[in-house]
Image (tube, rainbow, N blue to C red):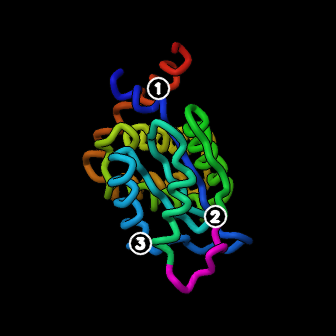
Amino acid sequence: MSDFKEFENLYSVRFRNKGYKRKRLLAPDREFEFLNFLMRALGENVFVISTGLGMDVYYTSSHDQSVFIEKNLWIFRPETEESDAIALAEVHSGNDVILYFNTVVQSLSGHPQLFLSCCKKLISKFNTTGVETPLNKLLYNCFDEQLNRLSIKDNVPFALKIAQIRSKNEHPFLKSYNTVRHLAEEYLAADHIN
């Protein structure tokens, strides 16, 4: 239960391009540098993921750091980009972060090609960052639960392809972690108890 104390202070912030540009906010190398910067500033419990729709930052902190994150995002943007090209779209805290993460995965499943692309990116991201921090464990568990539910219950398009990608591309530590399914439920239950 000690892992869950950190999630009393769980936050997420979403950035997107203004308009409907399907373009990454940061190049992959700059995203990695931004993640490292945030981890040095906020601690190990930071997770950054980008898609063509925007960039999500998940983190734990004693208070909302969205203004800090937004102000420092510009350091990692190319000088050729307009300073007002990015909008802070959403900020969530506590249980809303988990609900938001699950909603994002669920809503993406309505767009099969985008869903497949995002699944590949998330699997690659978890392969790179691992599930060693409490935040990564929580997010991976939510992702895994949603994929399993969508693949079996809702039979989303590309379910077979996603299963093949997972079996071929997920590192062994993620495959073995798939057997641990109670982290998110325990977190949510603990929050309702307190």
Amino acid type, mark 1: Tyr
Q: Give above or below for 82 relative to 125.
A: below
Look at 48% across and 29% down and name the residue there. 8
Q: Is residue 116 visible?
A: no
Residue span colored magenta: 78-86
Specify the label residue 87 is tagged with. none
**Residue 192 as seen in the image, left or right of residue 42:** right
Q: In the structure shown, which secondary structural element does the residue marked by tag 2 occupy?
A: strand
Look at 66% across and 64% down and name the residue there. 87
User: How far across and down, in percent of the image, does residue 167 sit?
Assistant: 35, 52
User: How far across and down, in percent of the image, does residue 15 sit?
Assistant: 60, 60
Q: Nearer the viewer, mark 1 or mark 2?
A: 2
Q: In the structure shown, which secondary structural element does the residue marked by tag 1 occupy?
A: helix
Q: Give above or below for 1 relative to 49.
A: above
Earlier in the chain: of badge 2 and badge 3, it is: 2
Which quarter of the rendering shows the N terminus? top left
Amino acid type, mark 3: Arg
Which residue is tagged 2?
A: 16
